[in-house]
């Protein structure tokens, strides 16, 4: 089973993906972990590599290519990244989108990265705009189009355990014979 967990920074992707992997005995592949691997291959710290990525679009493309390869070649995993649902496309059994209001996500990021909430909100808002533009330009993906996702949850409404319980219940109760079809990911250019 291939599950994807996508959403903006601070939405609870990592926590949820780790919980799903454990609940279903799946491997967990994080886009952030792959990014750090690529950084190490270039003998750079993740922070140095992130600065370089702002100027070199091939870094994004290399990361996305690796995630797409993992999605098309591996089974029995949870793939986590902002674009995981789009990159896995038709290979995913379930595509999950997590979100929360910006103020909630900024507070979570503030706690995680030890920075002021206002700064986290400003950076997160700017990052979202930049990423949306790049995804559209690179691949023809409208990151705000959530129609491809099977499940979408506002993680600010429930605690992490409850979010995991909802998702686990939905996945466990899935019956393939009554499935009338998932949304296709059409018009995407996987040009890495």
Image: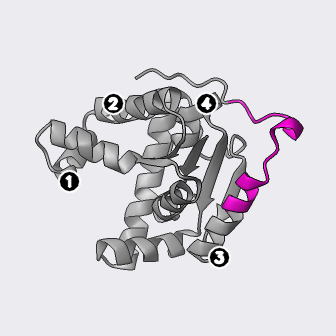
Q: Which mark is residue 62?
A: 2
Residue highlighted by disc 3:
158
Q: Is residue 177 left or right of residue 16?
A: right
Q: Nearer the viewer, residue 172 or 159?
A: 172
Q: Quadrant of residue 95?
A: top right
Q: Are marks 2 and 4 in contact (CB under 8 Å)?
A: no
Residue at point 82% right, 44% down?
Answer: 175
Q: Earlier in the sequence, mark 1 or mark 3?
A: 1
Q: Is residue 81 visible?
A: no
Which range is magenta? Answer: 167-184
The CA distance from mark 1 to mark 2 is 17 Å
Residue highlighted by disc 1:
47
The CA distance from mark 2 to mark 3 is 35 Å
Q: Secondary structure at mark 3?
A: loop
Q: Nearer the viewer, residue 148 or 30?
A: 30
Q: Secondary structure at mark 1?
A: helix
- In the rendered image, residue 116, in percent from the top left (x then y), is placed at 33, 79
Q: Are marks 1 and 3 in contact (CB under 8 Å)?
A: no
Residue highlighted by disc 4:
91
Q: Is residue 111 left or right of residue 27?
A: left
Q: Earlier in the sequence, mark 4 or mark 1?
A: 1
Q: Quadrant of residue 62?
A: top left
The CA distance from mark 3 to mark 4 is 29 Å
Q: How many marks?
A: 4
Residue at point 59% right, 73% down?
Answer: 161
Q: Earlier in the sequence, mark 1 or mark 2?
A: 1
- In the rendered image, residue 109, in percent from the top left (x then y), is placed at 40, 70
- In the rendered image, residue 144, in percent from the top left (x then y), is placed at 62, 47
Q: Secondary structure at mark 4?
A: helix
Residue at point 15% right, 50% down?
Answer: 45
Q: Residues within 10 Å of mark 1 (few under 14, many from 20)?
A: few
Q: Nearer the viewer, mark 4 or mark 1?
A: 4
């Amino acid at each position: 089973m291939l599950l994807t967990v996508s959403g903006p920074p601070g939405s609870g992707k990592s926590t949820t993906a780790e919980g799903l992997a454990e609940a279903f005995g799946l491997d967990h592949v994080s886009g952030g972990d792959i990014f750090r691997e690529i950084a190490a291959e270039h003998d750079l710290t993740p922070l140095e590599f992130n600065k370089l990525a702002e100027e070199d679009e091939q870094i994004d493309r290399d990361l996305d290519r690796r995630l797409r390869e993992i999605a098309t070649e591996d089974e029995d995993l949870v793939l986590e990244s902002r674009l995981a649902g789009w990159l896995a496309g038709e290979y995913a059994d379930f595509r999950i989108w997590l979100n929360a209001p910006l103020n909630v996500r900024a507070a979570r990021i503030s706690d995680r990265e030890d920075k002021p909430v206002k700064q986290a909100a400003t950076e997160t808002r700017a990052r979202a705009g930049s990423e949306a533009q790049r995804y559209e330009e690179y691949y023809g993906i409208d990151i705000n189009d959530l129609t491809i996702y099977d499940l979408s949850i506002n993680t600010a409404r429930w605690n992490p355990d409850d979010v995991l319980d909802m998702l686990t219940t939905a996945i466990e109760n899935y019956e393939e014979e009554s499935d009338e079809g998932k949304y296709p990911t059409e018009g995407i250019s996987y040009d890495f």
